[in-house]
Every structure is written in structure tokens, then in C-alpha cells.
Image (tube, grey):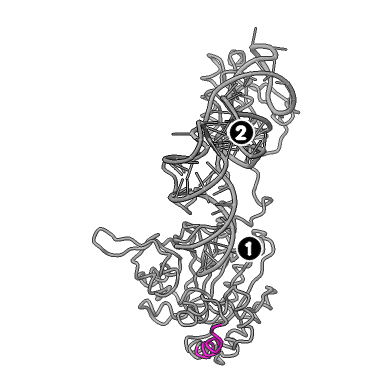
Amino acid sequence: MIRSIKGIKDILPDQMPRWAIIEATAHKLAQCYGFSEIRIPTFEQTQLYSRSIGESTDVVEKEMYTFQDRDGTSLTLRPEGTAGVVRAFLEHNLTSQLSMRKLYYIGPMFRHERPQAGRFRQFHQFGVEVFGTEDPFMDVEVIGLLWQYFSDLQLPDLTLYINSIGSTDDRQHYITQLQTYVLDQVQDFCENCQRRVQTNPLRVLDCKVTKCRSLTDNAPKLLDHLSSLSSSHFQSVQEGLSLLKIPFTLDHRLVRGLDYYSQTTFEITSSHLGAQNTIGAGGRYDGLVKNLGGPITPAVGFAVGLERVNLLLPDSLIPSSPAKVFIAAFGELGRPTGIKLLHTLRQSRFIAETDYRAKSLKSHLRTADRLGAQLTIIIGDDEKKKDLVIIRNMQNKMQIEVPISLVSEKLGLWMYNNVDIFLIS
RNA sequence: GUGGGUGUAGCUCAGUUGGUUAGAGCGCUGGUUUGUGGAGCCGGAGGCCGCGGGUUCGAAUCCCGUCACUCACCCCA
């Protein structure tokens, strides 16, 4: 048997109502905040990702699905959304049309990681990007949208962490200080950190090993080394969040793993998720558009892991399925009449179903029950001869006889106008 | 890439110190007045016990390998 690829999951029908809510809420909210949807390709030239995410990041170094096109160019399945959005933004000159551009996307992303709770090789993200303003209140708006999204979906026990990693210059200065601090006692750090202090020094800060954490507790803080510009930007972000009453926690260890981030970074985690507990995260990336060959354009955005959202989504949000009608048609005369009625009802957009395999009324009713039908229309030879059908209320077993020509009308009254047709007869 | 755990019916799992035709619950299907569903009762279908090798008179059970799933490291949404 051919199985699906490791870490790549089917979303089966019973999960679809959950996904429908997750996506519908994203669309509704993003548009409410003034964002327009964009659909970008699922694969691009490899260099788009390596250049924007960063050559030495884990994502680029060992997690991308990269392959050769027939002409030899290197292509990659998108590991995240921002790079593609920026590329489209530049390619179609969305810069010049408006001074500010707000875009959102929903779709699958691909990363070759070892699967784990809340982590898959194909997963889905909802993300937003704002181009063209460095106003700290736009950071607040983006974080506010993210917070509102989770709160609309009633996800439990969330914490918002924020930090600022400053400008490129701020970081350069800070990193040398951090390195001296770490190298001073480098043998006390874990192997990973001993390597990281050279390759990606900031990540030493968010090492999970307790020994490393206590060592870095006293390390110089990035927040103390921001330029006055960066510092006041971050100050304004915090004031904005307070103004909107969005609770947040400062976390000086919050360092994003993708190279393009600058200034504000943020992350929302849930305590119900296991090891992969980040459900949404993002930040500013003021340098990326220029890096990819565009004009200097400040930008800010986030991405949400929708599988993780699904893990937290309470059942109470899933709407009950709409009313269904089942046609129990049997006998030489009843069956064709019922099939015709089924067709008519569907043309009137009733949700109607039958079971062609069922021969007896009993088996019809059993299927009706299993499908969760609210009403069953019984039509056998006896009914056909009188041009009647029986409508049975599956909840209370009440039945009425109705002329075939009036079935649609009666069903409409019962379903859409709340008329109890079983009492009136 | 590195560890730990788990692989028995469609699903959730039992299976005793190796011992005969491998079990349960749920689900599916049929019957229980032949035209009235859900509950009860009775019956039925459905398993190369993940795969390959080894030990043994005998392996679902012990050993080795392999694959898959899963959790964690790592990384990130």
C-alpha cells in the first residue's frame, strides 16, 4: 500500500468544520483590520528563501525541500510566507500604488523536520505583512490583530511575549559584548551554545538548558544596549499595547530564528501544547525589502501555525451541522418517485440524501438515523398510489401525510420559518 | 540528524513463566411480526500478531535487524 509521506497529513472530513472556522475567522478579522488577501506560489527560486531567511539559519541549511527544475534552476517548496509576499510586492510594484500596503495569506508551508506534536512537514500558516510604515503603532496593530484572532477562537491560556532586538547596528555592538561574556566562561555552557556563540550568538540566550539559562541571567541585556531611536520605538510599542489593554510579558531572551527580523519581536505561546508551544509569532523586518532589491521599506508581520491553533480550538465553537432531509424510497413505484423528489429538493438547496442500497424501510431509517437526518420522507408504493409522502420527525417520531407537490413548501416552513408542521396538520 | 516509547480486527486495546483452531469492547452486517431508526437479546463477516531473519519440538510472546508511528532533543509557527 502506498502511504502518505512522513509528516504530511490528510485533513479528513470530520476535521473540516474546525478548519472552516479557523480560516473563516482569519479572513474576517484580517479584512476587518484592512488587510487584503494575496495568494503566492507554493514554490519559488531557492535563492529567494536563502537570501531572506538567512544562509546560516537551520531552516535554510537543513529544512528546505529543494529540487532541480528541468532546466537546472534550483527551486524550493516555501518554508514560510514572508519571502514570497515580499517578492510579489516588489515584482508587481505594489509599492508605488499606495504609501502603505497590508497583505495577508493562508496556505501550506513545507519544512523537512522530524515530526512531533504540533510539528509537521507540511503545515499551514495564516500570516499578515504591512509594508511602508515604521510607526510603532503599526506593530501594536499587528500584535492586536494576532491577539484578537486567538481570542475570537477562544484559545486557552495564552501568553504574549515581546522583545526588541534593535537595529542591525544595535545588534552588532551588543553581540560582541555578549560573546565576550560567554567566551569568558565558555566551558560552562552546553555543547550547542559553545558552537552557537560563534555561528548565531543571540540564540545562546534562548537555550533551554537550565545551566545555560542561569549563566545568561547575568549576561548583558540587549534591551540595555538599544540606540535611543530603537529604545523609544519599543517604548511606544509597550505604551500602545497597554492602551489597548493587551497583556504582555517582556522577555529579553526572545530572539527569532530568521535573520530578517529587527526591532520588535513577539511570540504567543500556550501552556497546553507540549514542546512546540509557539502558536503565533512575528516582528519587524525593516531591512528585508531592501535586501531583496527593493527600496528601503519598513515592514512588520506575523505568522500563525494553524495546526497548533486547531489543537487548542475548543469544541464549543464548532457549529452543529445544518438540518438534513433523508428520503426513504422503496418499492417499484416508491423508489423512482423518491429519486425524483430527491432531485427536486436538492434543486431547492435542501440538504437531502438517500441510500440506494437500502431495500427495506427499516434499513432506510437506520441510515437516516446514522446520517443525523432531522426529517425523513417515507415514500413506498402505498404512498405513491395516493400521491402522498409521509414526513417523519426523527426526534419525536411524529409523522404527517403531505401531498407530494407540497413537500418543498412544508420543509421550507419547518426549516427556515420554525413552523411545527407536525402540530398543524 | 540523536535519543526514548509503541507496533495484535476498521477503531481502542487484552493476550498470563514461549504451548493447540488469537480475544474483548466499539463499529459494520443480518435476525429479533414480511412497511418504521436509536436500546436489549441472538448470529455473522473481518487479523501473514508491522516486515525479515534467528533460537526452539513449538514464537504474538525470547534475540538481532529493518520499517512505520509517536514523544522529546534540535528547530520553529
Q: Whole-percent x and y of residue A14?
A: 58, 44
Near-viewer residue (A29 or A150)? A150
Up-down relation of residue A208 to residue B5 (above or below): below
Few, some or many C-alpha atoms within 10 Å of disc 2 (few <14, some 14-19, many ≥20)? some
Up-down relation of residue A163 to residue A402 (above or below): below
Magenta highlight range: A176-187
Image quadrant where one finds the N terminus of chain A: top left
> Which of the 4 image quarters holds residue A296?
bottom left
Name the residue that disc number 2 marks.
A371
Few, some or many C-alpha atoms within 10 Å of disc 1 (few <14, some 14-19, many ≥20)? many
Image quadrant where one finds the C terminus of chain A: top right
Q: Name the residue rendered at 53%, 23% in the picture.
A: A357
The residue positioned farthest toward the left in the image shown: A71
Q: Name the residue rendered at 40%, 64% in the picture.
A: A64
* Amino acid residing under circle 2: Leu
Which numbered dot is residue A150?
1
